[in-house]
Image (cartoon, grey):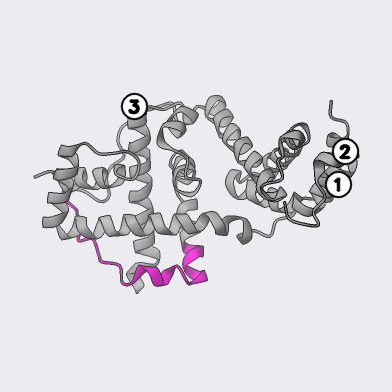
Amino acid sequence: MISCKRAAKLASEEFDRRLGFRDRLALRLHTFMCRNCKAYVRQLDFIKTACEQVEQRLTTLTEAQLSAEARARIIRKLSRRD
Amino acid sequence: MVSGTPDPRHDNDVNHVAARWMDRHGNTLFRYALARVGDPSAAEDLVQETLLAALRGIAGFRGESAERTWLTGILRHKIMDHFRRVARERAIWADVDEPPETDTDFDAEGQWRGDVARWNRPEQALEQAEFWSVFEQCVGALPEKLRTPFALREVEGVQTEVLADLLSVSKNNLWVMLSRARQRLRRCLQHHWFADR
């Protein structure tokens, strides 16, 4: 059986690439038998879900505004474009 | 095209278009950029580059997407270019062979040092403003080397191949960075949120 460390790495990589058959099988077998890694996989899933919501929240969270100077500078630049 | 919105293709007065874009979308674009690049002056430059590109490409605006969506799409490309530039200039992702960090989670045999606590109804956390502030702090606490790839991958949804190319790292190294980022983020959320619940 693969180590927990290896399982954790594969669980992460599964978000970023298609695992080969052997890796996938090894990961499934491991998480089936190991409750720590099972919990870890669930937590990664949760983090994924949270990140998907961050995208929408990012722009609304900050109340930063363009300064008047920046605004004027950009408009000046735009009207002088070539 | 949303009815009532003037079509910039038929607007001859460039200054007018520029001023209108700034009024309507300036702050939104600025916040969008700032939230991603973290530096106000870089964010201002990105807004400027975006609007310049938009003016040049006005003919390509087919009016099938709302103006803001169109501008945001351009800004996204500019943000990717920004990170490509950062990757090239600062080479923070270049030293791939750094010694592996001492692993807080696993022992020498690769077993968990302690039990991984189950998170109690994590989906409820998503409804709480307090959780989001912890989440943001935990992401912010990641070292830049891990934070940028993680945010581009997970928040912006950039494909792995594209991201590896953008940061000039091998896919293998990118997977390692992303795995480390997730590992740290999980640990941080465990300590600062789920441990008390």
Instruction: Please determine if labels 3 and 2 lie on a single subunit.
Output: yes
- Check residue B19 in the rendering and tell me which mark sits there, or answer none: 1
| Residue occupying the point 81% across, 43% down | B8
Q: Position of residue B36 (x, y in %)?
A: 58, 46
Snapshot quadrant of residue A22: top left
| Residue occupying the point 86% across, 46% down | B19
Task: Look at discs 3 and 2 and give the one toward the viewer.
Answer: 2
Q: Along the line of sight, which residue is nearer the eye, A12 or A5? A: A12
- How many neighbours does mark 3 have within 10 angstroms: few (below 14), some (14-19), or many (20 or more)? few
Instruction: Please determine if labels 1 and 3 lie on a single subunit.
Output: yes
Chain letter for the residue marked with disc 2 in the picture: B
Magenta segment range?
B110-134
Looking at the image, is mark 3 or mark 2 earlier in the sequence? 2
Chain letter for the residue marked with disc 1 in the picture: B
The quadrant of the image that shows the C terminus of chain B is bottom left
- How many neighbours does mark 2 have within 10 angstroms: few (below 14), some (14-19), or many (20 or more)? some
Distance CA(mark 1)–CA(mark 3): 49 Å
* Amino acid at the residue labelled 3: Asp
Snapshot quadrant of residue A43: bottom left
The answer to whether one can see residue B107 in this image is no
Location of residue B56 with respect to B37 vertically, above or below: above
- Check residue B14 in the rendering and tell me which mark sits there, or answer none: 2
Location of residue B36 with respect to B192 vertically, above or below: above
Residue under label 3:
B97
Helix, strand or loop at disc 2?
helix
* Amino acid at the residue labelled 1: Ala
